[in-house]
Image: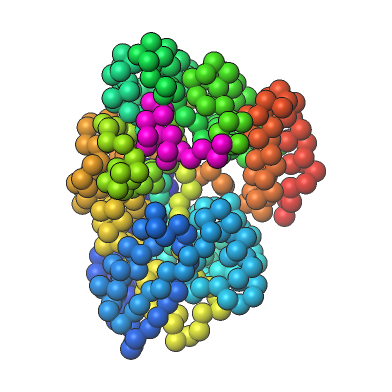
């Protein structure tokens, strides 16, 4: 897989495997010395099965280790985790949900150094670089998402609009949304051409990843302007639900796409697993769908579509006692390897480790679209980080989040809001 943050674990030496049990995941972990119970943080456990999947998969490798998953609130995960770490009640292992707060955890000595575990991966394990600070590595990635365009083939057919080709710029995407809206209106459908969720990621993540020379910490956010102008046009012309309506009505992207209220939607690859589960349970409608690459800045990247998403890694609480540490490190060595990747792929999660076997497991899952464009999208999308690791990232993203709300609610024009955000970053964001 060509995603830039993909883990591609190569051959590891026997000596490296001895250091950390299962190493890159190709062999079984070193058995625990007697029964051990570890705790692992997760969120939305009823709809996010990846945590229990990893726990169960590792328990099969080492039956002496039981991993209990503790549920946190998805929206307030980092706030709750920070509180528990300060109180000494945090779990043994906890997920770095994205890179936004990684620097805060690491600089606050709230993550143990996992250099020995990381050493079991060879130089091609690029995803580990995001968790490397100075001479240490402070989390192990198990998942690498990428943002795609999900599209409803039935609604495209109803509207009489050609399906994605995999070669769309953002102007092509916007025009397609308008064409879909016209076609759906003519057919008597109440669906929208597109749905854009309320997160700042839906605009800013693409702008940062795709625009040449874009720099999150620079204070210059003029590169976001064309992305915002297109989004505002689509909501003003009724091709997608307005930001105000989506916010006040608490719309969810799962419902908007899953119940066919929108013909297409940019969203992360994690939604594959959710959509499959909801179609099986009846929460989502049955319809034909596919995934297409994210629209591109220009046609120069059609062969290797640029998109975004942070890796998802697991770190070790430095307060874990010595009796548990070896088992915890063995588990962390496991999560970045092929056995864990296969288990994740089989529930529709895009793992950090990739191989032909993992790709086949993902597309062998019942309900996953297997057309050539969906396979190309999965295999060739290059995911760049939404939150480049920096001392300023958390502050900058909070400022830009406020700017996003102001722009999309049409409280103020785009240019002045982005200029004000830049001024605030220059005066408020730490530099060291």
Color theme of the render: rainbow
Residue at horizontal 64 percent and vertical 48 percent from the top: 393
The region drawn magenta spans 249-264
Q: Measured from the top left, where is residue 6 in percent x and y? A: 38, 49
Residue 26 drawn above or below residue 182: below
Residue 80 drawn above or below residue 288: below
Whether the magenta-drawn stretch holds residue 44 is answered as no
Q: Measured from the top left, where is residue 135 in percent x and y? A: 54, 65
In the image: residue 79, left or right of residue 127: right
Residue at horizontal 74 percent and vertical 47 percent from the top: 429
Q: Measured from the top left, where is residue 86 in percent x and y? A: 65, 72
Residue 89 shows in this picture: yes
Residue at horizontal 44 percent and vertical 82 percent from the top: 324
Q: Measured from the top left, where is residue 210 in percent x and y? A: 50, 31
Residue at horizontal 55 percent and vertical 69 percent from the top: 111
Judged from this view, the residue extending furthest toward the right is: 427
Residue 293 shows in this picture: no
Q: Nearer the viewer, residue 112 or 373?
A: 373
Q: Quadrant of residue 265?
A: top left
Q: Quadrant of residue 257?
A: top left
Q: Quadrant of the C terminus?
A: bottom right
Q: Nearer the viewer, residue 26 or 81?
A: 81
In the image: residue 341, left or right of residue 176: left
Q: How many marks?
A: 0
Q: Quadrant of the N terminus?
A: top left
In the image: residue 60, left or right of residue 233: left
């Amino acid at each position: 897989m060509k995603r830039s943050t993909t883990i591609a674990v190569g051959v590891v030496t026997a000596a490296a495997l001895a250091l950390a049990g299962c190493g890159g995941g190709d062999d079984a972990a070193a058995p625990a010395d007697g029964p051990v119970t570890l705790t692992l943080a997760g969120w939305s456990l009823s709809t996010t099965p990846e945590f229990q999947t990893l726990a169960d998969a590792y328990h099969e490798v080492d039956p002496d280790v039981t991993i209990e998953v503790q549920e946190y609130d998805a929206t307030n995960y980092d706030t709750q985790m920070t509180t528990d770490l300060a109180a000494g009640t945090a779990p043994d292992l906890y997920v770095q949900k994205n890179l936004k707060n990684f620097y805060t955890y690491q600089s606050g000595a709230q993550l143990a150094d996992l250099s020995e575990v990381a050493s079991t991966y060879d130089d091609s394990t690029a995803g580990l670089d995001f968790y490397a600070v100075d001479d240490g590595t402070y989390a192990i990635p198990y998942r690498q998402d990428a943002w795609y365009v999900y599209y409803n083939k039935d609604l495209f057919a109803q509207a009489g609009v050609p399906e994605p080709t995999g070669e769309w710029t953002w102007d092509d995407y916007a025009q397609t949304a308008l064409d879909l809206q016209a076609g759906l209106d003519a057919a008597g459908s109440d669906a929208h051409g597109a749905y854009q969720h309320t997160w700042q990621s839906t605009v800013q993540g693409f702008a940062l990843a795709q625009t040449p020379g874009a720099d999150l910490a620079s204070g210059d956010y003029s590169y976001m302007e064309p992305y915002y102008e297109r989004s505002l046009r689509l909501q003003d012309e009724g091709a997608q639900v307005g930001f105000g309506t989506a916010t006040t009505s608490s719309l969810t992207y799962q419902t908007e796409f899953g119940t066919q209220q929108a013909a297409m939607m940019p969203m992360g690859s994690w939604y594959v697993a959710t959509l499959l589960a909801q179609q099986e349970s009846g929460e989502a409608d049955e319809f034909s769908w596919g995934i297409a690459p994210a629209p591109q800045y220009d046609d120069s990247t059609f062969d290797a579509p640029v998109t975004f998403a942070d890796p998802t890694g697991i770190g070790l609480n430095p307060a874990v006692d010595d009796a548990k540490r070896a088992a915890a490190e063995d588990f962390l060595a496991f999560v970045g390897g092929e056995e864990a990747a296969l288990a994740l792929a089989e529930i529709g999660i895009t793992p950090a480790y990739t191989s032909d076997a993992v790709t086949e497991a993902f597309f062998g899952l019942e309900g996953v679209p297997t057309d050539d464009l969906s396979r190309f999208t999965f295999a060739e999308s290059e995911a760049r980080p939404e939150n480049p690791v920096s001392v300023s990232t958390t502050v900058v993203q909070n400022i830009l989040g406020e700017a996003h709300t102001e722009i999309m609610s049409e409280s103020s024009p785009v240019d002045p809001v982005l200029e004000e955000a830049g001024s605030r970053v220059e005066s408020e964001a730490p530099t060291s």
